[in-house]
Amino acid sequence: MQRFDWAGCARRLAVVGIVLALWPATAFGQADQTALRQLEQQLREIDTQLRLSIPADQPIAERMQLDYGGSIRFGFFAIDDRSGSTRILRQTDGILFAQLDLDGAHRFFGRLRFRYNDFNSGDSFDGRGDRFITPIGDRYWYQFDLRGLHRAQTGERLDHNFTVRVGRQFVTWGSGLTLSNEMYAALVDVEAFNFGLIGLAGVTPRSSTVDFDATRPDFDRNTKRRFFGGMLEYRGNPGFRPYTYGLVQRDRNNDERTFVTPIGSFPTEFEYDSEYYGLGVRGNLGPQMRYRAEVVHQRGRGLSNSFDPATGMAVEQTREPIRAWAGLLGLSWLARDVNDSRVDFEFVGGSGDRDRVRPGETFGGNQSGTTDRAFNSLGYVNTGLALAPDISNLLSLRLTFSTSPFQSARRDDWLRVGMSGFLFLKADREAPLNIRTTTDSRFVGSEIDLFMDWRVTSDVSLSVRYGVFLPGSAIPSDEDGARHFFYTGVTYAF
């Protein structure tokens, strides 16, 4: 039996407490940004246009299809931070878009987004107060589709295909564990012999990417990470589509910062280069069951922590290896009833590193001379509204039921309601999460999220989101109150 060193633990907690007290980006601020990012991702583009076969000798005005429109949304957020205080945000979000299709092969898309955040006094998440969110032009890309061109010219479908999309776009790589973010990117897809080969080259937009390293200068408004990837997917069977990929991330931030605390100064450099190797599958089991699964192995090298948590003294940073993992398993059961009811289950997990103070940061990060086991990426998975933790050192179980109770072909409106239940555990009970300090207990807590989407008329819709997190034994006693998240928004589309 090992004896617990209470005195040593107290010394380490004191040192970590002093450093965290001066932390430039608070944990509850990061959690809030994660929750906002989740809501923003609900507005991802949906392409519903169907290509038409048009004779090639027609004038360009008859071969061209133009779609344009916009929407304006007024939203209200109420978010509890770790101290139990509620932060209030009113957000106005206007969107104008245009999409042009030519000959079934050439597609041009552009979108302008005007967002203004209006906080109660002192409630700003990043300390910058009320302001417009940049950039205004947040999506613009061109896409070429060889199969679409051949179909428009001949009416026949090619067995092979070549597509390329270039510009500022939203990229989800695989299941989204490793990359789910806006990028300036080129995506190339070559399909032949029932296989698809996808290539990616891109860089994150500096002004709209929130980095996982919150100790890096301007982590939420000046992020420069480059990505290169390749994915091979089998497409011969719609019910069974396995894939494998490699994704390379290179840190081009070149930042330096000196953290000054009452116990000393800590010059810190930042560098985190990583590679991700994934294996996944998606498909269906009969007409009612869909599935998806992915496992990821992360490798690479990153700079170590600039101080020793045991002594609080500055140490020389070293480049240490990264060896981490993450995984996802999802099942969806479709009732196929008149109400379009469904049940979704998802398990997500990521590895952690027990000698870190914080899972994703350099200052307070991996200890010199050790392998970094914490999984970090610019990916996204749903981990709830109220707590919204990153997947580093997290095991998350989610069960969701949703239905449209008044669905009818004779109704012009539409209502959908649902509820999600979450269970959160630590993968390594001694490793940290990105929700500030935790105890060595494995049980983080549970959460219930409720949602409602109501299309009041053909032009007006109402959305409501509410989440409550109930802390478990891994949350310190002075932070064990329930945390709430509430959002409602009205959208007018034109």
Image (cartoon, grey):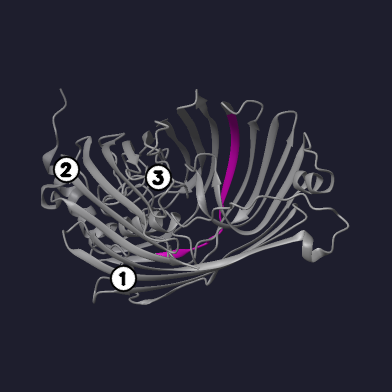
Which comes before the other along the chain, label 1 or label 2? 2
- Judged left or right of residue 228, residue 469 is left
Cα distance between the residues tagged 1 and 2: 46 Å
**Which part of the image, by quadrant, shows the N terminus?**
top left
Is 251 part of what is drawn in magenta? Answer: yes
Q: Position of residue 204 (x, y in %)?
A: 55, 58
Mark 1 and mark 2 in contact? Answer it, CB < 8 Å. no
- Kindly identify the amino acid type of the residue bearing the numbered disc 2: Gly
Q: Position of residue 279 (x, y in %)?
A: 54, 30
Q: Position of residue 480 (x, y in %)?
A: 13, 48
- Residue at point 47% right, 29% down? 291
Q: Nearer the viewer, residue 268 or 428?
A: 428
- Kindly identify the amino acid type of the residue bearing the numbered disc 3: Ser
Which comes before the other along the chain, label 3 or label 1? 1
Element under label 3?
loop
- Judged left or right of residue 383, residue 137 is right
- Judged left or right of residue 300, residue 257 is left
Mark 3 or 2: in front is 3
- Judged left or right of residue 220, residue 206 is right
Give the magenta part as a residue range: 242-257
- Where does label 3 land, which residue? 408
Quadrant in which residue 66 is drawn? bottom right
Using a 10 Å C-alpha cutoff, classify the residue at mark 3 as few (fewer than 14 neighbours), some (14 to 19) or many (20 or more): few
- Where does label 1 land, which residue? 90
Q: Nearer the viewer, residue 245 or 252?
A: 245
Using a 10 Å C-alpha cutoff, classify the residue at mark 2 as few (fewer than 14 neighbours), some (14 to 19) or many (20 or more): few
Element under label 1?
strand
- Where does label 2 land, which residue? 8
Q: Position of residue 317 (x, y in %)?
A: 43, 52
